[in-house]
Amino acid sequence: MSAADLIAHYRKLKAQAATSLTNDAVSQTLIDMALEALDFLVAEANVVPLTSRVAGKTYRAYRIGERISRPINEASFIADPDGLTKAVKSFSAAKLKAMPASDATRLIYTMGMAFYAALDVLKDDDKKTPATHFEILAARIFAMLFAVQPTYAIPLQASAGAVADELPTDYIFDLGTGKPKIHMPVKASTRERVIQVWAHQRILDGAYGHGTYKGVLVALNETKLDRQRLIVTEICVPLQWRVYQKYIAQMDRVYYLDPPAAYLALAPAITVKPFGELFSDLSHFQG
């Protein structure tokens, strides 16, 4: 597999997602990308043990030549291609809802990280592709759970005689009459511009009233790799999050695929959970 092969898969995924995130073809492309990426990593890359400065977590990376992947949480990653081939058969709404939360988190984490690691060792400094892939992965899961195609902007009330404003957003899921709407920003990492998440929620609350839109942030991780010393750390700002939650707006939920302990500990001020717990929370979003 080459970088061109990965990008070809990615472009196919983007085109499918742009047409409809409720289409099962999006799931199949996500599955194919994960399986092919993991096969490539096992066959062609070397495993690099990393020194973890994150309590209770062990990380690895993959390397080809001078290129090294982002850190991968070993407990959350299905490193065996046969194991992943079996696990992806559960990538459907019904089966995800029936799985233990930890297994669901592990499957989805692997589907993302296998592709990102393969891209890392084949292509230099590509941040946009994995970020967009993660957005599509998260949005596809919400779209198949709620059978709703998301929108990407919110109309805002205009003053008399003026043209209505519009707020661009990540994903908005309208669950139907009498039910809350979901405002779902997606971030591979929240270290940059996370205040925008709370700012958008504040605008929605001001325009439509508190509770009309439930803010649900989906994030991948907060890990950082020192590539010289091969040391993994987490960078978290829980005090800032508390301030945003208290003084800007209330995010209803935050779901992480590799949740930092510092953010899990923010409960009850902010509800932060492993991603797999989404599937037992569905009644919370459906009114």
Image (cartoon, rainbow, N blue to C red):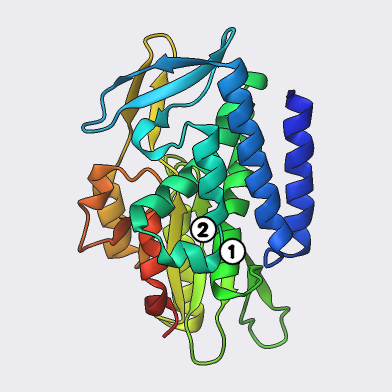
What's the residue at 47%, 17% (across, down)? 47
Q: Name the residue nearer the viewer: 264 or 34.
A: 34
Of the image marks 2 and 1, the number of the one nearer the N terminus: 1
Residue farthest to the bottom, as pictured: 178
Q: Bin the neighbour count of mark 2 within 10 Å (Cα to Cα): few under 14, some 14-19, many 20 and up.
A: many
SS of the residue at dot 1? strand
What's the residue at 42%, 54% (across, down)? 104
- Judge whether residue 120 can be spotted in this image: no
Left or right: residue 282 versus residue 154 is left
Q: Position of residue 212 (x, y in %)?
A: 46, 82
Give the position of the C terminus as an image quadrant: bottom left
Left or right: residue 241 versus residue 163 is left
Specify the amino acid type for callout 2: Pro
The residue that label 2 is drawn on is 185
Q: Is residue 117 above or below residue 228?
A: below
Give the position of the N terminus as an image quadrant: top right
Q: Is residue 130 above or below residue 225?
A: below
Q: Position of residue 255 (x, y in %)?
A: 39, 56
Q: Position of residue 179 (x, y in %)?
A: 48, 86
Splitting the image into 4 quarters, where does residue 10 fall?
top right
Q: Name the residue nearer the viewer: 47 or 80.
A: 80
- Judge whether residue 170 can be spotted in this image: yes
Number of disc labels: 2
Q: Is residue 83 above or below residue 5?
A: below
The residue that label 1 is drawn on is 171
Q: Position of residue 79 (x, y in %)?
A: 47, 31
- Check contact, mark 2 vs mark 1: CB within 8 A: yes
